[in-house]
Amino acid sequence: MLFRSLGVTMLQGREFDAYDTEKAPRVAIVNQTLAERFWPGLSPIGKRFRFGRGGEYVEVVGLARDGKYVLLGEQPRPYLYLPLDQQYRSPATLHVRTAGDPMSLVPALRRVLAELDPSLPIYNLRTMEEHLRQSAMAMMPLRMAAVLSGVQGGLGLLLAMMGIYGVVSYVANQRTREMGLRVALGARRLDVLRLVIREGWHLTLIGLGIGLVIALVLAFGLSRLLYGLNPFNLPVFGGVLLLLSVVALVASYLPARRAARVDAMDALRCE
């Protein structure tokens, strides 16, 4: 029942049962990685091992699929399961699998446990989602890293916007006489606006191309370290490119609007 509750798949052998008591022969269930390390190419069922030279021999009665035991993003590691009656350690964790709201079963669960042992303390009740969100070994470090990365990304976006605005503004100021000459020769202010924005947009396209390549390389590398990261998430990359494009257009539009409002005579007299 434990393995079905946890969603662990049994590949060979059996689960623990009521006969695996303290007085029964010692048994264990191992995962795939442990079985392959100690008995490569063989079935681990019936194999025996012991902890230390003076330890009692333990017989393998089941083979379970590999899982996550410490970190969500960890590589497969050797792991084994032992019956609670044969290897009791406190505190113990009771896992309950439900089809509906798990917290609605808490009163009934408390009553059942009180009938089994009235002195048994019950504490730290929470769902698996809450455990993953709050645990220092699960999602909490990733969530904190995501928040910090988001703050850094926001600061980077602000700096990029200021940089584009500064460059386009500097280029527009350097070409003030040219803008005045174009207006004096009949160019519309809309044409001047498009000219300045196009200059900023060319810089943006170059930056987006270089940034996209670097982002893909970093995402592919981080996908090996961060759990659940898809290095080729097209909606995310598309949304980021769209956001940066809008920001670049706004940053280019501000100095372009100022350049389009320059008086032709004042611009021609500008040194």
Image (tube, rainbow, N blue to C red):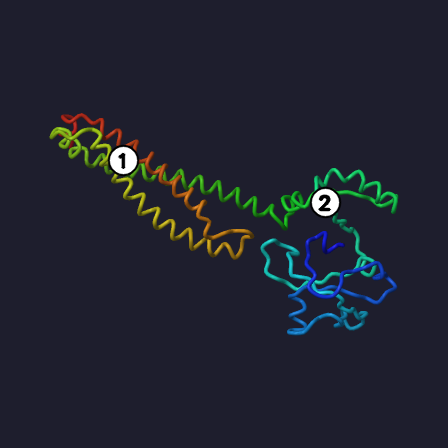
Mark identifier at residue 193:
none
State the residue lying farthest toward the front: 99
Q: How many numbered circles are shown?
A: 2
State the residue lying farthest toward the left: 185
Give the quarter of the image for residue 182.
top left
* Residue shown at the point (86%, 65%) measured from the top left: 24
Residue 249, visible in the rendered structure: yes
Pair 2/1: label in front: 2
* Residue shown at the point (76%, 66%) measured from the top left: 61
Q: Which residue is mark 2?
A: 98
67 relative position to 233: left or right:
right
Q: Locate residue 256, reporting x and y percent.
A: 26, 32
* Image quadrant occupied by the N terminus: bottom right
Give the SS element for disc 1. Answer: helix
69 relative position to 213: left or right:
right
Q: Which residue is mark 1?
A: 169
Residue 269, visible in the rendered structure: no
Question: Mark 2 and 1 residues: CB-CB less than 8 Å, in contact?
Answer: no
What is the three-letter code of the residue carrying label 1?
Ser
Instruction: Give the spatial CA distance, label 2 vs label 1.
Output: 62 Å
71 or 4, nearer to the observer: 4
Q: Residues within 10 Å of mark 2 (few under 14, many from 20)?
A: few
Please tell me which of labels 2 and 1 falls first in the chain: 2
**Figure check: 201 above or below 88:** above
Q: Locate residue 200, reporting x and y percent.
A: 28, 40
What is the three-letter code of the residue carrying label 2?
Thr
51 relative position to 139: left or right:
right
Q: Locate residue 220, reporting x and y percent.
A: 46, 55
271 relative position to 200: left or right:
left
* Residue shown at the point (74%, 42%) measured from the top left: 125
